[in-house]
Amino acid sequence: MDRYDPEGTGYNPAASGPKDGVEVAWSHDSTDWFRGTESPILLGDTLYAVGEGLLALDAETGAKKFGHPGPYQSPPARSHSSVYNTDTLAVGSSAGVFGLNADGGVGLPLTGTRFGVERWNQRYETGGLFFGPAEPVAPVVADGEIYTPVPGESDITALDPNDGETRWRTTITEDDTVGADFNRPAVKDGLVYVTYWPNGVAALHTESGEKHWQRTVDEQLLLPPIATEAGLVVPSREVVWLLDPNDGTTLWKRTLDANATESTPAVADGIIFVTDELESLHALDLETGETLWTAPFGGATAPVVADGVVYAVKEGYSLFAFDAETGAKRFEFQPPQVPLSAPVVGDGVVYAVNRERVIALEEAK
């Protein structure tokens, strides 16, 4: 799923990628309807990308396995199903959540179309946000449930992956004049953690949706939370908090010279990797918030970490790789087309969506 795991760490300890430079291993650009900017996900030997539809490619060669246009916008999250022989992919949009067949359904001969790709949909009649439709948020799958904000509303919901039916739906804020602007949730140890505009952080029980705790912090614009063994990482425009996951109290608070409005941090091996969106990427100690290193890097990013390397796409146009321990820059890659999505790392390969195409990057020879 997006950010690799329900906790939202952006860290895959089983993966490795290029370390000293990259070149294009393959490029898929033959699907006329595909327009993607979101990170793909890698499941076994299949790479899934979303952009006005679902595209499934062979991860080794880039060959198309299947494609299906549709109103799908967020990175997908895989869920096992008890009523189907294949997995279901939960995909978000500005109007709701869709359950898609991970194997692509059945192709109809001579037509180029497929039957059975979409298994169910949970559409919502929403009022939207003040500035227009709600931005799609990637669903999170944990313990056989799908957790997601309701677009344009102030609710978090849990859905059954078999049919998309609502297990529970909880209103986080009571102001019905505008929906809470939620980030991607984080799920860990029976709790769903959410951050939302303005100022809000909450923890809900995964089984019932009952609020475990809810609090405000002294910054309005919050970024996606990350659930860790040490606590809940809550980033904002200028501040990073570590909160006690049991009651939401502050364990530490670190203020940066920052203006981060669009980024998502990563956490790996006790280190938080967070950009200030001005001029630096920071590595903070997870236990204390103290700076371990700072590297030159300006702009928004959602870094991922694998095998001691931090991969970060700067403002959608350039992929950087940093040594996770020291912050030393290992390489930079600028694609011929932009924007470039946040990457996902596989077996020695970095994959990214490049708007009208999907690319795989391997170690430069």
Image (tube, rainbow, N blue to C red):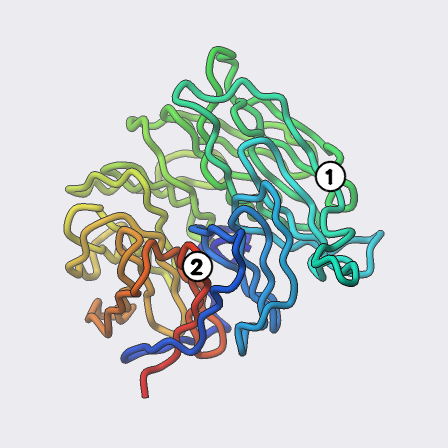
Q: Could you tell whether 223 is left or right of 39 in the image?
A: left
Residue 164: give its label: 1
- Location of the C terminus by quadrant is bottom left
Q: Could you tell whether 359 is left or right of 240 in the image?
A: right
Instruction: Write down the quadrant of residue 10 in the picture.
Output: bottom left
Q: Position of residue 237 (x, y in %)?
A: 26, 36
- Location of the N terminus by quadrant is bottom right
Residue situated furthest front in the rendering = 110
Q: Residue at the location (50% across, 19% down)?
A: 173
Instruction: Please name whichever residue, 106 or 261, is drawn nearer the observer in this view of the structure.
Output: 106
Q: Secondary structure at mark 1?
A: loop
Q: Residue at the location (32% across, 26% down)?
A: 220
Q: CA distance from mark 1 to mark 2?
A: 27 Å
Q: Could you tell whether 294 is left or right of 28 in the image?
A: left
Instruction: Please name whichever residue, 262 or 339, is drawn nearer the observer in this view of the structure.
Output: 339
Instruction: Please name whichever residue, 50 or 287, is drawn nearer the observer in this view of the structure.
Output: 50
Q: What's the residue type where badge 2 is placed?
A: Val
Q: Residue at the location (49% across, 72% down)?
A: 346
**Residue picked out by circle 2:** 353
- Which is more foreground, mark 1 or mark 2? 2
Q: Secondary structure at mark 2?
A: strand
Q: Earlier in the sequence, mark 1 or mark 2?
A: 1
